[in-house]
Each structure stands twice: as C-alpha cells, then as structure tokens.
Amino acid sequence: MSANTETTTSSMDPLKWGVAIILLLAAVVGNYMLSDLSVAIRVAGVIVAIAVALVVAAQTTKGQTAVAFARESRTEVKKVVWPTRQEAIQTTLIVFAVTAITALLLWGLDAVLIRVVAFITGVSA
C-alpha cells in the first residue's frame, strides 16, 4: 500500500500570499503612521489586519495543510496522559536534588583541580 500524496498548488496561491503579506505590512506601517490615534484603536486595527491575513493565508494550499496539521495536533494532545500534580512535584524535586548533587560534585572537583594545578605550578591558590 503506497500513499501517493501530491501537492497541487493553485494558480491563485501566490496572489493570496501576496495579499496576506501586504495586509501584515499594512498593519505594521499603519500602526506607526497612525500613532496619533488611541492605542486601543490601533491595536484593534492590527488584530483585524492580522486576522484577515491569516484567513487569506489559510485559503492557500500550504495554509490548508497547516490548518489540518493543527487540527491533528490538537487531537493528539487530547490523547496524552498528563502527569498528576503529585507526580509533577515529585519529578521536580528529583530534578532539584540531582542538580544540587551535581553542582556540589563539580564544585568539589573544581576545588581539587585548583589545588593540584597550584601544587604543580608552585603558585599558591
């Protein structure tokens, strides 16, 4: 069984991507050019422009693939068995303990190596 997946791009895809990019650029430039307006109005305009750009981009072949991937990812996340609070706390404490032990070992090794190098070179540490 061979799944033959071919990606066919629409002739309108480049135009849609261009419109999406222009909308995003318009959001950025408009935000700076209209600095005399209130921040709330500018934020609303930027959010609307980005939303419209995302809708336009989602209409392309790659955009539809990305939306399908996001849906499948959400389905997979629902299948994950997340740790309980107690398991998360225990794992965190283990990580802290191992980190502290490793830090102490490295500190001790550093102190020993400093003394060995000082002894070999004759320089007091």
Image: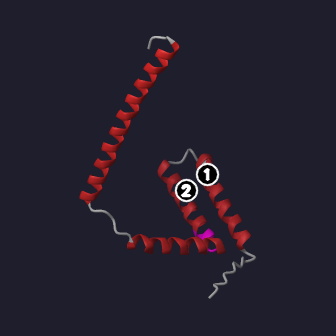
Cα distance in 3D space between marks 2 and 1: 7 Å
Q: Nearer the viewer, residue 114 or 13?
A: 114
Q: Viewed as shown, does residue 116 lie left or right of 58?
A: left
Identify the image quadrant of residue 59.
Answer: bottom right
Q: Nearer the viewer, residue 12 or 41?
A: 12
Colour mapping used in the image: secondary structure
Instruction: Name the residue: 44% across, 75% down.
Output: 75
Q: Residues in magenta? A: 55-60
Please give the residue where the numbered disc 1 appears in the rendered image. Answer: 28
Asked if residue 72 lies in the magenta stretch, the reply is no
Quadrant location of the C terminus in the rendered image:
top left
Magenta: main secondary structure:
helix
The x, y position of residue 41, in whole percent, is 50, 54
Do the numbered discs 2 and 1 sit on residues whose CB atoms are within 8 Å? yes
Please give the residue where the numbered disc 2 appears in the rendered image. Answer: 46
Count how many numbered circles sit on residues in the image: 2
Q: Amino acid at mark 1?
A: Val
Instruction: Name the residue: 26% across, 53% down.
Output: 90
Q: Amino acid at mark 2?
A: Val
- For this orientation, the residue located farthest to the bottom is 1
